[in-house]
Image (cartoon, rainbow, N blue to C red):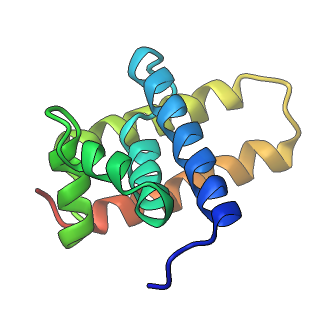
């Protein structure tokens, strides 16, 4: 990979920091996932901030998940169940709102597609 210029490196770092911040928020809010944001942060950091990428890969709690995703696209079964449950709950809440019918149909269909894809991934 060609080394990034200073502007590109700055943009990759900003993206990595935003993703880390969202992952940190997600560690405390059950409706916001943590690991997908950390996966994105490690990806962005790999393009502009190798030290942050290394820190994420070696993180005692989340590093293993990031490494397994990179090596095999693996998602732990517990994470699959949690994501599926949150999508089902989100769909149920959405159906109880005054959202337009297209949203009440489209969002659950999209979430179902994501769940199918997620369950097709290998497990760690």
Count of labels in the image: 0
Seen at 29% across and 68% down, the residue is 120
Seen at 20% across and 37% down, the residue is 59
Image height of 86 relative to 8, above or below:
above
Q: Is residue 97 left or right of residue 124?
A: right
**Which image quarter: residue 118?**
bottom left
Position of the C terminus by quadrant: bottom left
Percent x, y of residue 38: 40, 44
Of residues 30 and 18, the one drawn nearer to the viewer in this rendering: 18
Position of the N terminus by quadrant: bottom left
Q: Farthest residue toward the bottom?
A: 1
Percent x, y of residue 62: 23, 38
Image height of 92 relative to 116, above or below:
above
Seen at 56% across and 50% down, the residue is 13
Q: In this view, does 40 lie to the left or right of 6?
A: left
Of residues 84 and 65, the one drawn nearer to the viewer in this rendering: 65
Of residues 77 and 47, the one drawn nearer to the viewer in this rendering: 47
Q: In this view, does 93 lie to the left or right of 58?
A: right
Percent x, y of residue 98: 85, 25
Q: Farthest residue toward the top?
A: 28
Of residues 119 and 79, the one drawn nearer to the viewer in this rendering: 79
Percent x, y of residue 103: 79, 45
């Amino acid at each position: 990979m060609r080394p990034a210029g200073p502007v590109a490196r700055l943009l990759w770092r900003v993206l990595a920091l935003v993703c880390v911040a969202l992952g940190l928020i997600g560690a405390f809010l059950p409706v916001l996932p943590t690991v997908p944001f950390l996966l994105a942060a490690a990806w962005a950091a790999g393009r502009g901030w190798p030290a942050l990428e290394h820190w994420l890969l070696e993180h005692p709690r989340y590093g293993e998940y990031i490494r397994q995703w990179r090596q095999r696209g693996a998602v732990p079964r517990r994470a699959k169940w949690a994501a599926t449950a949150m999508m089902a709950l989100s769909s149920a809440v959405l159906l109880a709102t005054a959202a337009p019918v297209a949203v009440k149909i489209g969002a659950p269909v999209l979430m179902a597609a994501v769940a199918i894809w997620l369950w097709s991934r290998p497990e760690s």
